[in-house]
Image: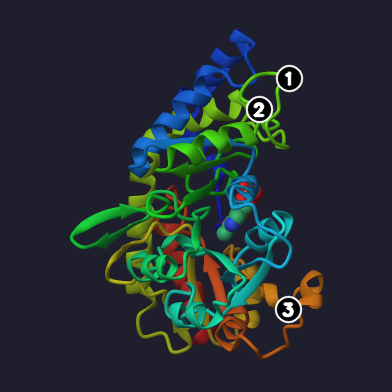
Amino acid sequence: MKVPLLDLAAQLETIRDEVVPALMEVVESQRFIMGDQVRRLEEGVARHCGVEHAIACASGTDALLLSLKTLDLRPGDEVITSTFTFFATAGAIANAGGTPVFVDIEPGTFNLDLAAVEEAITPRTRAIVPVHLYGQMVPMERLLPLADRHGLAVVEDCAQAIGARRLIDGAWQQAGRLGTTGAFSFFPSKNLGGWGDGGMIVTRDVARAERLGKLRVHGGAKQYHHEEVGTNSRLDTLQAAVLLAKLPHLDAWNAARREHARLYAEGLEGVDGVTPPPTDRANEHIFHQYTIRARRRDDLKEHLTRAGAGCAVYYPKCLHLQPCFAPLGYRDGQLPEAERASLEVLSLPVYPELTAAQRDYVIESVRGFYG
Ligand SMILES: Cc1ncc(COP(=O)(O)O)c(C=O)c1O
């Protein structure tokens, strides 16, 4: 049997009749730039997230970068984030003119260790970028008061967490809703993926929303009038049409991922050598990735690959140890939980269209390895 890590072709079969006509509508209109679908997608995502404002842009990376640009960072300003995330999180901080300050993770959820965040705050700290990794949220009810006490902005990296929620004071709060801004990615593999690159910023702050709306079109609301230097980071109308057609499916897709995760946990129970991913009790996880810890991870990965069961390591090298950040002076062993995770994690197929037989095959293949 072959089980890909992700099967977008299987998803296409379920939505072709909705997406293709939506694309053809854009083609017929020939309105490829900032067509009506972009505005409708912004409204749809804002509603889904429970915020007033959403600003579409060209990628998740740009959603982070533009968010950070609104903080007007100056050389030497520090932005605290996780070392265990996709490169874009820290790349955006550097490109916005800030200095990334990497902190360790909490070993259960793989998310930022908030005690480490507190210790990392200095007089130069301007912001924190929590990453809701693999699809479950950082405890925002603890992070936000900490940020408030120190006057720091909070840019949520929600690239892997669209639709994730956390129960805070008896109310569900969506990823992206509580921060200064929330940055989403529509990279094709994401839980809500386009047919190309795309991103979205959400915020409850009207002034920031207006500024972001300008920054994505060269810094001016009026054509040929530029209040500041922005960039070209529009979302294509074609991508907005794809995403608008897919958005109504998002909650069901996320629920299907959760059900796969539940059955993986059942199927992997008692396997000596495997730790299934724990979900924080206050979180509704959306399982962008189903990521286990595995003893002899690299051997297991090879075994699964040979068996035709897709798997991947997110992420094999922490950001504080990347060559481009060598001038920041981090050492091997400095952020031990993240470094350990980079040696132990393995993500298994968890896409909504995965069949029970495929899931069972992955479970059996893992069990077979540990004998
Ligand atoms: C945690 C995280 N941050 C940022 C990004 C960047 O998003 P994009 O690829 O849309 O630029 C991604 C996804 O690729 C991601 O997983």
CA distance separating discs 3 and 2: 38 Å
From where the camera sits, is residue 2 visible?
no
In the depicted structure, whether residue 116 falls above or below residue 249: below
309 left or right of 245?
right
Closer-to-camera residue (252/303): 252
Residue 95 point in image, percent of width and height: 73, 55
Q: Nearer the viewer, mark 3 or mark 2?
A: 2
Q: Are marks 2 and 1 in contact (CB under 8 Å)?
A: yes
Q: Which residue is mark 1?
A: 224
- Mark 3: few, some, or many residues within 10 Å (few <14, many ≥20)? some
Question: Which numbered tag is attached to residue 220?
Answer: 2
Count neighbours of disc 2 (C-alpha within 10 A) and say few if under 14, some if 14 to 19, many if 20 or more. some
Circle 1 Cα neighbour tier, 10 Å, few/some/many (<14 / 14–19 / ≥20): few
Q: Tell me whether the residue at label 3 lies in contact with that at label 1, contact meaning CB atoms closer than 8 angstroms.
A: no
Mark 3 belongs to which amino acid?
Answer: Leu
At a point 33% along the width and 72% down the height, the residue shown is: 280
**Residue on which the image places disc 3:** 321
Q: Position of residue 79 (x, y in %)?
A: 61, 66
| Relative depth, front residue between 32 and 229 | 229
Q: Is residue 35 above or below residue 304?
A: above
Horizontal placement of 341 versus 363: left or right?
A: right
**In-front residue for pair 40/77:** 77
